[in-house]
Structure formats: structure tokens, C-alpha cells
Image: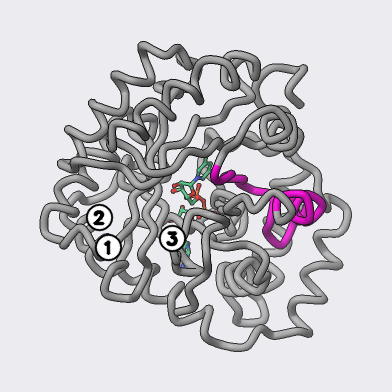
């Protein structure tokens, strides 16, 4: 496993990291014991960065993760969670709510501090409030030792530049922007590097689009995107390849991205993921799949308030 500095935080994070939304049964109903085993295996395989949120499974993911973490020594992982998003349409980025939210997460996770606290999907809120109220509240929690670093997450790339130009943050988490079908995060990387911001890229499998099981029903991609991804899945399948392997290898090949979060609650899939990234990519297959995905390249969907897209 490779390890990279997460911007200026001083955290040395594994190139492949563990996204815990699956523990909240976001993609399928999971078996809790199997989910816990997956977390333990992640640590054994050298993944040292774990991302979760109160939103995932509406607090279930944090609760299940907390049970798993009780059996792991605290110096073996960095824990990132989030504030501000509590349900599909329920957001609250106020000082009072995010302060309480951190205490609730600490309780569920059974921890006394969080390594990285992130404002979850800021495009749904007012960016002025994020800059003037939410981030200062999180910096106050940093002073108290409850959190070590502060970041933001979201889908539209312009939110990151907007917030960073107004205030200091330590990391950004971008999702579905660096995978086989969408590499638009590339354009932002020079700016993020100049600002020494930690770069976390999530959803290398495009939240299930680039898997044999396909995307979950809540996936916001258009029919056109779903259709082209499905064609790519079938193309690989016919040739005896699993598109998830190609997708993961592709996403992990960019050394400018400090860590890539992949989600799974299956030990078998996690082991495959860790093994796949050590193997060389099939360049010919990559080229063929990229040609197939060209018609939807960098096509995304709206997220949050229109003015933030
Ligand atoms: P992903 O692209 O990692 O895809 C997850 C899906 O792929 C799941 O259905 C999983 O079962 C499946 N999968 C994983 N490994 C597989 C394998 N080897 N073979 C076949 N299928 C496999 O998407 P994700 O889980 O949404 O993203 C990863 C993590 O990133 C999340 O858990 C979360 O922590 C984080 N994230 C954050 C945000 C945000 O902050 N707004 C958004 C998206 C993701």
C-alpha cells in the first residue's frame, strides 16, 4: 500500500481508503457482523483512513463503525466524519447543530476525538453560512481538541474554489469526479496543490455505476449516463473482465490524489480492491472502455442549490 501526505495536515494516508457509507446499508441491506469484519480487514490490509457521516444509514453507519473501532487501537487509523447533512433533504449547518453533531458522532463512534471533520455536501447550504458560521464553529472544536482538521465535501467543483478563496480549510472531499467516466477533478488539482489542500477523491466506482450490480435506485445519474456505464460493464464482462477492477486501478493511478475512498461492506470485495491496485492496468481494455464512455465524459448531475452548481 502506498501512503501520501494529506495536504498540510501531516497525516500520511493510504492511497486506498475505506468509505463506510456501506455500513449504513446505503447500497444493499448488509449483515452487521460482515460489515464489522470488513472494517477489521481494511486495517489489516493497510487502509488507515476511514470516512463516515451521520447521514449514512441515518446514523447507522457511525454506530456500526463504532462497534468495529472498539476492537482496533486508536493509532491504527484516521477517522473522518461530517456535519450538516442528516437526511436526503435535511441539512443544518448552524453553529449550534454542528457543535452538537460532533458530540453525537463521538458518542456513536466511541472516540474522544475526530481526525477530520467535514461539512457534508455544502452545495445544499448557503456558502456564506459555511464560511462565516459553520467553519468557525468547527475551528472552535479544534481548539478544544475534539477535532484535528477541518474540510468540506460536495459534488459541484466550483464550491471548493469559492470556499478556499474566502477561508482556510485543510481538505476537500470530491466524489464521482475522478473515475473512468468523469475526470473533471483534474482541472482543480493545480489550484488545490497551490493551496496545499488535502485531496480526497471518493466513489471510484461512480457509486455503483461501474460495477456488475449496477447503481442503486437513488443514484442521481441520468438514463444516458447509466446506459453508457452499463454498456461498459457488459463490454468488460463479455471479455472476462470485471469493470470494477479497471475502474479502481484507473482512479488509483493518479498520484496527485492523496487518497481514494471506496465503499464496501464485503470482505471479499475489499480484498479484491486491495489486490487489484497492486496489479498493472490493462491499457488496451482501458482505451476501449474510455472510447465507449466518451459520449458521457464528465457529464454529471445537479446537486444542491442552483447557484452552487
Ligand atoms: P463507490 O464508487 O466506492 O462504490 C460503492 C459500490 O461499489 C458499492 O455498491 C460496493 O458494494 C461496490 N463495490 C465496492 N468494491 C467492489 C468490488 N470489488 N466489486 C464489485 N462492487 C464493489 O461509491 P461510494 O461508496 O459512494 O464512495 C466511497 C465512499 O466515499 C463512501 O462510502 C463515503 O465514505 C465517501 N463519499 C462521500 C461523499 C460525500 O461526502 N458527499 C459522497 C460519496 C462518497
Nearer mark to the viewer, of 3 and 2: 3
Label 1 close to label 2 by CB (< 8 Å)? yes
Q: Secondary structure at mark 3?
A: loop
- Residue sitting farthest toward the left: 71
Residue pictured at 43% horizontal, 29% vertical:
139
First in sequence, mark 3 or 2: give its number: 3
Residue at point 48%, 73% (across, down) = 3
Quadrant hosting residue 60: top left
Q: Residue furthest bottom?
A: 280
- Residue matched to label 2: 35
For the image, the number of numbered tags is: 3
> Where are the magenta residues, as a range?
170-192
Q: Percent from the top left, x then y, of residue 110?
A: 15, 41
- Tell me the SS state at disc 1: helix
Which residue was labeled with disc 3? 11
Q: Nearer the viewer, residue 23 or 11?
A: 11
Task: Work out whether 301 lies above or below 239.
Answer: above
**Nearer to us: label 1 or label 3:** 3
| Beta carbon of the mark 3 residue lies under 8 A of ligand 1 | no
Drawn side of residue 86 relative to residue 154, left or right: left
Classify 10 Å Cα crowding around label 3: few (below 14), some (14-19), many (20 and above).
some
Task: Indicate yes or no whether the magenta region holds residue 18.
Answer: no
Sequence-first tag of 1 and 3: 3
Amino acid at each position: 500500500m502506498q501512503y501520501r501526505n494529506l495536504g498540510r495536515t501531516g497525516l500520511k494516508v493510504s492511497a486506498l481508503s475505506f468509505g463506510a457509507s456501506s455500513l449504513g446499508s446505503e447500497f444493499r441491506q448488509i449483515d452487521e457482523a460482515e460489515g464489522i469484519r470488513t472494517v477489521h480487514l481494511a486495517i489489516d490490509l493497510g487502509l488507515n483512513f476511514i470516512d463516515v457521516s451521520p447521514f449514512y444509514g441515518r446514523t447507522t453507519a457511525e454506530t456500526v463503525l463504532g462497534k468495529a473501532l472498539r476492537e482496533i487501537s486508536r493509532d491504527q487509523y484516521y477517522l473522518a466524519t461530517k456535519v450538516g447533512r442528516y437526511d436526503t433533504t435535511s441539512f443544518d449547518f448552524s453553529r449550534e447543530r454542528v457543535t452538537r453533531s460532533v458530540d453525537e458522532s463521538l458518542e456513536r463512534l466511541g472516540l474522544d476525538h475526530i481526525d477530520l471533520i467535514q461539512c457534508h455536501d455544502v452545495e445544499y447550504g448557503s456558502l456564506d453560512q459555511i464560511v462565516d458560521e459553520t467553519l468557525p464553529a468547527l475551528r472552535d472544536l479544534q481548539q478544544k481538541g475534539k477535532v484535528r482538521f477541518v474540510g468540506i465535501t460536495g459534488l459541484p467543483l466550483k464550491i471548493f474554489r469559492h470556499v478556499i478563496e474566502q477561508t482556510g480549510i485543510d481538505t476537500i472531499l470530491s466524489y464521482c469526479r475522478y473515475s473512468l467516466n468523469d475526470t473533471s477533478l483534474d482541472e482543480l488539482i493545480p489550484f488545490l496543490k497551490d493551496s496545499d489542500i488535502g485531496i480526497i477523491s471518493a466513489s471510484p466506482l461512480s457509486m455503483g455505476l461501474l460495477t456488475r450490480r449496477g447503481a442503486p435506485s437513488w443514484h442521481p445519474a441520468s438514463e444516458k449516463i447509466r446506459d453508457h456505464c452499463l454498456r461498459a460493464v457488459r463490454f468488460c464482462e463479455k471479455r472476462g473482465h470485471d469493470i470494477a477492477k479497471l475502474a479502481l486501478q484507473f482512479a488509483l493511478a493518479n498520484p496527485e490524489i492523496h487518497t481514494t475512498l471506496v465503499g464496501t461492506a464485503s470482505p471479499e470485495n475489499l480484498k479484491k480492491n486491495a489486490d487489484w491496485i497492486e496489479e498493472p492496468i490493462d491499457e488496451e481494455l482501458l482505451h476501449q472502455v474510455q472510447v465507449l464512455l466518451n459520449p458521457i465524459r464528465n457529464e454529471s448531475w445537479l446537486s444542491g442549490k442552483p447557484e452552487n452548481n
